[in-house]
Image (cartoon, rainbow, N blue to C red):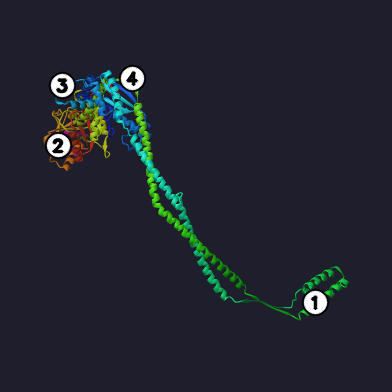
């Protein structure tokens, strides 16, 4: 935690454990800036002075602007090659044409002509050193430098998304800027007229006539070859002949397959015919039934009739007797017929013979028709093959003539288009200024520009950047501490207390409160549930601040906390005022009373066994135990410069170690070395005490930052 003594915006000193890894705040940045204020101001003055000088020397410049409209159409050709294509109307090609106009405008010849017309001395007046430079340069070198300077003052660009070319020329003299821009545009128009003078229409027309004659001759040869072969469309006729040949071949194959099938069926049918008998047994029957005899059926009807009459009439009725008589007669007839049975035998011709004979006949007829069909298809195949051979023989010549015709046709169209375009170009070049129009003269748009304010703002901004960079570099290169947060971040230790510069010479309630708070914090701290009894304060250098703090802390514990306290001062130049009375040796250390009640101080530390460099660790622990029995709290302060070996031994024996960091005195490498020394010796680090803090910011800034 940070403590401020006697400052308006800070609370009283009260130690507390700082947050882990305190971040870099705006206040830290401002403090670092004010600490290195001289370096920051000196670095900021350099670009600021440069900006002021540049603003004083800056001149007011005038920029005259002309606008040119580039018309992209087929009336103008930008090609000087008679075999090249004509002008394109595509947007991409149009943009390329507009860019080419800009290149012509910025060409050295156009600029040289403009400089000669305006005058080199008018455009670029001689300076103080001009006579000297002209003595070592030729006239050609002078013109080359003038062209280079002219291009730096000239800006010709295409307005985005259009075919407008904006031409700007900058000069300190307004009239010269306008005159130069107008002269440049006129020279550009005159130059491009000369560039685009290209009488190629006559040459192209001769080529068109030659292509036309060759194309007519080729067409006649193609028509004659088609008439001779009998072809209307060669590709279609070739496909038709190929399809016809394929169909005939397929049909021949089908006929051959059918003929082979019929031959096999005919052989099999004839073999089965020979194996069949001429007749087959039908059936044999023996029966007593005569044809047209229905006695049995009649007997059945009479029996049914008798039953019906018996149900309706008396048993001795006349109808019953008649029916019974008929039944007896029929039964007698049936009995007589059974005595003479009849026999019937029948044989029929084999029916398979007729089927097989018909099948053999049909197969022979079909085979004969397939033979005739095979002959006809063979004639068709021969005719189709002859047609294919005829087309194949004419194909090579027809392909050659067709290729020649396509080449001639393409060349004819190309040269015809170029001839028309060239004729239009020559006509347009003679009647008007081709495809470039002057939309705006230079005098219509003149802008004034002064760099005084930009130079001033640039110097101011550069001064801020340079000052910030210088302050940052100085902070990085600084090897001492100026804020309590810096040792906290670097050493990764909490700040237990912070004392302002000269706090040891200005006693007051703030200092007493800070020391009391620090004492309370140490008494409340435990290690492995054991309160602190022996505390070691270390400093990387000898000074009087740490002994003063240890004395005040010991007095606080003795007087305010009523604790028997022992102070061992190993780094003080002026020892604590000792009492002349009681002196005794406890734990290998000679102690004596002091004017403060309950406060003892170490005496004769040079000859004390506890502070000997040859003391074993075990004996040192035993001696320290004796001291802890005799005293409630032991405060030890030492420095590496005073007794480094003793300090390392004490870091192992005490309960906790606290580092002392003095603002603007303690170097960062020394503080890191002290922390590492304690860690390597196996001591326990509790935190740090920050002394000598100074306030570099004004009070109002502290309250706001």
Q: Which element type, helix, strand or loop, lies under badge 4?
A: helix
Instruction: Answer whether residue 644 is magenta in the image.
Output: yes
User: Callout 3 environment at 10 Å: few (<14), some (14 to 19), or many (20+)?
Assistant: few
From the top left corner, tell me how far across and down residue 281 is, in percent.
Answer: 64, 77
The circle drawn on residue 644 is 2
- Picture quadrant of residue 518: top left
Q: Disc 4 marks which residue?
A: 444
Q: Quadrant of the N terminus?
A: top left
Residue shown at 14% from the left, 41% from the top? 615
User: Callout 1 environment at 10 Å: few (<14), some (14 to 19), or many (20+)?
Assistant: some
Real-space Cα separation, disc 1 to disc 3, in angstroms: 175 Å
N-terminal of the pair, mark 4 or mark 3, is 3
Eyeballing the image, is 625 above or below 106?
Answer: below
The circle drawn on residue 331 is 1
Q: Disc 3 marks which residue?
A: 131
N-terminal of the pair, mark 4 or mark 1, is 1
Q: Are circles 2 and 4 on residues that touch, CB within 8 Å? A: no
Q: Are circles 4 and 3 on residues that touch, CB within 8 Å? A: no
Real-space Cα separation, disc 3 to disc 2, in angstroms: 76 Å
The magenta-colored residue range is 633-651
Residue 509 or residue 216, whichever sits in front: 216
Q: Nearer the viewer, mark 2 or mark 1?
A: 1
- Picture quadrant of residue 116: top left
From the top left corner, tell me how far across and down residue 167 is, in percent.
Answer: 31, 25
From the top left corner, tell me how far across and down residue 62 is, in percent.
Answer: 28, 20
Q: Nearer the viewer, mark 3 or mark 2?
A: 3
Q: Nearer the viewer, mark 2 or mark 4?
A: 4
Residue 360 or residue 661, whichever sits in front: 360
């Amino acid at each position: 935690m940070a403590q401020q003594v006697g400052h308006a915006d800070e609370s009283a000193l009260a130690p507390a454990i700082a947050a882990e890894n305190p971040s870099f705040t705006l206040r830290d940045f401002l403090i670092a800036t004010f600490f290195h204020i001289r370096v920051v101001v000196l670095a900021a003055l350099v670009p600021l002075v440069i900006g002021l000088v540049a603003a004083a020397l800056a001149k007011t410049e005038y920029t005259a602007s002309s606008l040119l409209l580039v018309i992209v159409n087929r009336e103008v050709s930008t090609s000087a090659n008679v075999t090249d294509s004509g002008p394109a109307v595509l947007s991409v090609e149009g943009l390329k044409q507009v860019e080419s106009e800009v290149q012509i405008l910025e060409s050295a010849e156009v600029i040289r002509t403009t400089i000669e017309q305006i005058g080199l001395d008018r455009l670029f007046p001689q300076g103080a050193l001009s006579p000297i430079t002209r003595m070592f340069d030729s006239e050609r070198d002078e013109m080359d430098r003038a062209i280079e300077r002219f291009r730096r003052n000239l800006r010709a660009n295409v307005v985005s998304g259009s075919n407008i070319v904006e031409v700007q020329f900058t000069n300190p003299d307004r009239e010269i800027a306008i005159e130069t821009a107008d002269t440049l545009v006129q020279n550009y128009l005159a130059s491009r007229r000369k560039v685009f003078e290209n009488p190629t229409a006559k040459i192209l027309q001769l080529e068109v006539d030659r292509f036309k004659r060759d194309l007519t001759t080729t067409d006649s040869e193609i028509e004659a070859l088609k008439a001779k072969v009998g072809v209307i469309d060669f590709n279609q006729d070739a496909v038709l002949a190929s399809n016809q040949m394929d169909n005939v071949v397929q049909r021949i194959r089908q006929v051959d397959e059918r003929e082979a099938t019929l031959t096999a069926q005919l052989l099999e049918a004839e073999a089965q015919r020979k194996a069949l008998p001429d007749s087959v047994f039908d059936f044999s029957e023996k029966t007593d039934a005569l044809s047209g005899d229905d006695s049995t059926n009649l007997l059945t009807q009479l029996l049914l009739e008798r039953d019906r009459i018996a149900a309706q009439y008396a048993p001795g009725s006349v109808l019953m007797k008649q029916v019974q008589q008929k039944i007896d007669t029929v039964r007698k007839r049936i009995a007589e017929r059974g005595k003479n049975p009849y026999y019937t035998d029948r044989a029929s011709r084999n029916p398979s013979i007729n089927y097989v004979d018909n099948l053999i006949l049909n197969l022979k007829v079909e085979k004969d028709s397939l033979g005739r069909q095979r002959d006809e298809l063979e004639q068709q195949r021969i005719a189709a093959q002859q047609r294919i051979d005829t087309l194949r023989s004419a194909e090579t010549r027809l392909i050659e003539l067709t290729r020649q015709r396509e080449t001639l046709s393409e060349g004819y169209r190309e040269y015809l288009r170029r001839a028309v375009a060239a004729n239009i170009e020559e006509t347009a070049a003679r009647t008007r200024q081709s495809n470039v129009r002057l939309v705006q003269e230079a005098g219509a748009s003149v802008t004034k520009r002064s760099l005084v304010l930009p130079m001033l703002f640039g110097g101011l901004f550069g001064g801020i950047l340079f000052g910030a960079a210088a302050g940052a570099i100085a902070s990085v290169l600084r090897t001492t501490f100026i804020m309590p947060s810096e040792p906290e971040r670097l050493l990764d230790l909490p700040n237990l207390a912070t004392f302002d510069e000269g706090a040891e010479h200005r006693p007051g309630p703030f200092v007493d409160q800070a020391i009391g708070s620090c004492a309370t914090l140490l008494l409340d701290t435990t290690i492995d549930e054991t309160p602190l009894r022996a505390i070691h304060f270390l400093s990387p250098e000898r000074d009087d601040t740490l002994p003063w703090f240890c004395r005040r802390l010991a007095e606080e514990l003795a007087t305010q906390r009523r604790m028997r306290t022992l102070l061992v001062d190993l780094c003080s130049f002026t020892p604590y005022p000792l009492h002349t009375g009681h002196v005794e040796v406890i734990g290998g250390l000679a102690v004596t009373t002091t004017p403060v009640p309950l406060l003892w101080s170490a005496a004769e530390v040079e000859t004390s066994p506890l502070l000997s460099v040859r003391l074993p660790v075990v004996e040192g622990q035993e001696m320290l135990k004796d001291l802890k029995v005799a005293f409630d709290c032991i405060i030890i302060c030492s420095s590496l410069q005073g007794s480094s070996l003793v300090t390392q031994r004490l870091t192992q024996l005490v309960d906790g170690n606290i580092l002392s960091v003095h603002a603007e005195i303690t170097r960062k490498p020394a503080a890191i070395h002290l922390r590492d020394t304690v860690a390597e010796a196996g001591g326990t680090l509790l935190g740090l005490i920050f002394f000598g803090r100074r306030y570099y910011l004004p009070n109002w800034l502290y309250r706001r930052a």
